[in-house]
Amino acid sequence: MSLGQSINVQKQVHAHRNSFVPRVFTVTGKTRETVDTVTIKAHSGDGGVQLEVHPGQFNMLYVHGIGEIPVSISAVGSDGALIHTVRRVGPVSKALGSLRIGESFGVRGPYGTHWPLESLHGRSVMVLAGGLGLAPLRPAIHHLLKFRDEFGDVGIYCGARSPADRIFASEFARWQKAKPRTNGAKSNEVRVTVDRVPDHVKAAWQGEIGVVTSLLPRSLPDPGNAAALICGPEVMMRHAVQDLLQLGIAKEHIYLSLERNMKCAVGLCGHCQLSRYFVCRDGPVFSLDRVERLLTVKEL
Amino acid sequence: MASISANIGVTYRMRAGDLGALFSALHAANFLTIGPRLSGGGIILEELNGPEDLPIGWGDEQEAGRYRLRRREDQAFFGYNLGPESWKKFLTPQRQLLWRARRQGETFTIEQPERPSGDPQQLAFIGVRACELAAIRVQERVREVSGQPANDLIDAKCKAATPFLVGVTCAQSAATCFCTSMGTGPALGPPDSSGVGYDLALTEFPSEGDHHFTIEVRSERGADIASRIPRQLATEKECDAIRQQSDTTAALIRRHLKLDNPGQLFRDSLEHSHWDEVASRCLSCANCTLVCPTCFCTNIEDTSDLSGDVAERWLRWDSCFHLDFSYVHGGSVRQTTRSRYRQWLTHKLGTWHEQFGSSGCVGCGRCIAWCPVGIDLTVELKALTLSPEVTGVQTRKYEHP
Amino acid sequence: MTTQTIESLIGSHPFFVGLGAEFTRFVAGCAKNRYAEKGEYLAHEGDEAAALFLVRRGKVSIETNVPGRGGVMVETLGAGDMSGWSWLFPPHKWTFDIKALEGTSFVELNGKCLREKCEGDPRLGYEVAKRLAGMMVERLRSTRLRLLDLYGDHSA
C-alpha cells in the first residue's frame, strides 16, 4: 500500500472511530454460548476499510431504534469479521442477541486501551477470567497461544457460575492441548472452576467447584517476571488482585479491564469517568498501579 | 468616521449613544447579535436587535440561593453581573440532532441531515465577562482533548466559526463572584497565546452627561467592525480608567476560594465526613450543572418513532447529578446524593486539572446563587480541606446505607 | 512407609510449611499415608471427626446428601489443600462428607492424637490453630464471594 493510500486509510479509520455515526454491519454467524449469552459474527456491508482491533478493546453496538451499548471484542476475526459476545440482560443486548443472520446493526469503534501483550514478551502471563469477563480476554488468550514462544509460563484460569454458564466451553479442550513453548521448559496450564453445580448436571461435571482465585498457583518461580490479566465482576477482581499481589506480582504488571457507563466512547460525554480517567479512553484496560486506590472507594 | 480604519491594540472611545453602530456593523457583516436581555425576572442570553434590547439601567443582587434584579440609578447597559445562562447555550446547544436512520428490510441507512448551503450563520456575543471568556476557553480545551466529533454536529449555528466576542469589563461584582481566586477576572486582559482570542473589549463609564465606552481592539475582524463605529482615540487617562475600574471591582470581591493543591482534594478528602453534611442539604437537582459555564456532560439518546422505522440519535445536555448517569449492570455506581455531589466537586476543582490542565471552575459564582438550598462551594471546600482536628469532626469511613 | 518420609510429606505440604523440624517430627507421630479410590469416602457427616487430611495428589469433594437431590457438592479440593478441623472443636463431628472424585493420595493425621499433642504443648497448639484459622478465613472468603453470585444477572 503506498504512503498516500495508507494515510487515506488512517484518516478513514480515524474519522470513523471519532464519530457518532455507526457503520452498518451484517450478522453472518451466531453461536449460542449459554442460555443468555450469544457470540455474534458480523461483516461490514459498506465495503469500507477493515477495523483494526486489539485484544481488550470494545465497540459501541447499535440496534436500530433500540439503542447502543459497549461490547468487548471477543475474538479478532480474519477477513474483516467482527466478533462480539453479548449477554442478554437489557433491551439493547436482548435485541442484539435476537438478531438473525442477515440482519444489520451499527458499529462504532474500536475504542479503548488494549491488553499490552507486546510489552509482556518474555514474561509469564496468567489470565484470570470470571464469568463474562472471559470475553475480552479470549483474544488475548488466542494471542498468547499463537505466539507461544514469546512468553514464559502461561496460565489460564476461568470461573463461571455453573457448568452451563461457561462461555467458549468448547475451546477449553483446545487450549489445554495447545503446545507449550518449543524452547525452554515452560508450561501451559488451563483450569476451570464453577461456583456451583446444579443437580441435574452434577454427574456430568468432572471439574472443580470453588471460587476462581482458588485455581491460582500457590507460588510463582519468578514473580518479578510475571504478569496477570484479569477481567470479571469488579468484586471478583478486587479479591483476585489481593491474591496476585500475595504471589509477588508487581502492580504495574497486573492489568484489569474495568467497566463504567459508556455513551459516547470518545471521552466527551463524561459518563464513564472514574476519578481522573475516562474509562472509554484511558481504559478499559488499566494497570493496577493506576486504579488500585480508586477501586477501594465506594461509589466513586 | 467609518472611513478611517481601526487598528489592533488601539483603544478608542465611543459615546454610549453610538452603541447601536456596533450592532449595525455586526449585522452588516452577517453576524447574529446575541447578548443579555431582561426576561422573566432575570437576565438571560438571547438574540438582540440593538442596544435597546440590553438591560439598560438594571443590575442584579446575588447571594447563596438568591438572585434578584434591582433598578440602578443610572442607565448603564452592562450594569448587572451574570444571569443563570452561559454562552454554552449557543456553543453547545442543549439538544442537537446527530443523525436519522431509516429501516430498510433487514438493514437500515443513516442520513446525516443536510447542512444548509452557503456560509453558516455567524454569531456575535455581546457583553462577555472575563470569567465567561475563561469558561469558553475551558470548554474548548475539553473538546480539543477529547477530539470531539465536530463533523457530526449538524446544527448550523453551532457549526459556525468562533463567534465574534465583544467582552465587557465588570464594573461591579456580585457577592457570589470569586473570579479573583481563579485568576479569571475581573479584567478582560490582553488575549494571550493560549487564551480565547476575543475581538473587542468594552468598558462602560455611565457617568451622567458623559456616558461613554472605551473600545480596545483585539483582532483583525474586531478592527474591521470598529472601523464602522464613530469613535475617537482614547486618552491616556481614559485608558487608565479601564484598569482602575477592574481593580476597584476586584477589591470589592467578597468570596474567596483557596485550593493550593487540587490533587490533594481528590486524594485525601474522598472519605471526609463533610460529604455527608453537604449531602444532607443537596437536593441533587442539577441546577449547578445547568448554570455552570464549563459543565460539559452530555447524553447520547437514541429514539424511534412508533413504527420503529425511523430512528434518531440526539446529543443532549446531561448532569452527573442524575441518578442514572453512572448506570451499569442494573444499577448506578453513584446511588447516593453524597457520592454524586462528591463527583461534581472533586471533578470541577480537582481531577479537571489532570484531565485538561486547568481548573474546571472560573469563579462565576452561578452555582452558589442558583442552588435552591444555597450550597456554597467556597465554604464546602474550606470544610473539606480542614483536618478533623480543626473541624472537630471525625473523618470516618463512609458506611453503606 | 517410614515415619521419616511422612515427616517430609508433612513438612513440605503448604498447610504445615514453616512449622519447623521439631514440631513436624512431633505431629508425624499422628500421621499415616493413605490412598482413596474414586468414589471412596474419606469422611461421613455426623461421624466422629477423627482426622485432618493433607491432600497430596487427586481431587476430593466437600458434599452433603440432600434428600431428593442425592449428594450435592459444595467445593472441590486438590493437591496442596487440606480439610478437617472439626477434630479440634466440640462436638468433634464431621459437618460434611468428604469423597474422593478420583484416585487420591493424602496424609491423614489422627485428630485425637493431634488434639492431645496440641493441648500438651501450647506452642504447637498455637501454630496449628493459626494455620486452621487462616484456612477458615480463606474458605469463608471464597464462600462469601460465591454467595454474592457475582456472575449472576441481578438487573431484574
Image: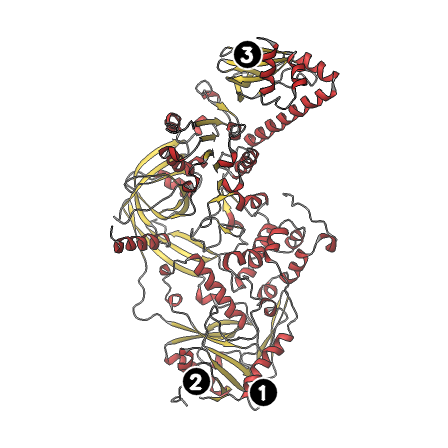
| Residue bearing mark 1 | B207
| Residue bearing mark 3 | C41
The residue sitting at 61% across, 23% down in the picture is C17
The residue sitting at 68% across, 23% down in the picture is C127
Q: Is residue C44 at all visible to an observer of this figure?
A: no
Secondary structure under badge 3?
strand
Colour logic: secondary structure
Task: Judge left or right: residue A126 versus residue A183.
Answer: right
Q: Nearer the viewer, mark 2 or mark 3?
A: 3
| Residue bearing mark 2 | B21
Circle 1 packing at 10 Å, graded few (<14), some (14-19), many (20+), is: few
> How far across and how far down the image is residue B345, in percent?
58, 57
* B36 and B131: which is toward the camera: B131
Q: How far is mark 1 from mark 3, CA to CA?
A: 102 Å
> How far across and how far down the image is residue A123, in percent?
45, 36
Residue most extreme to the front: A184
- Chain identity of mark 1: B
- In which quadrant is the N terminus of chain B drawn? bottom left
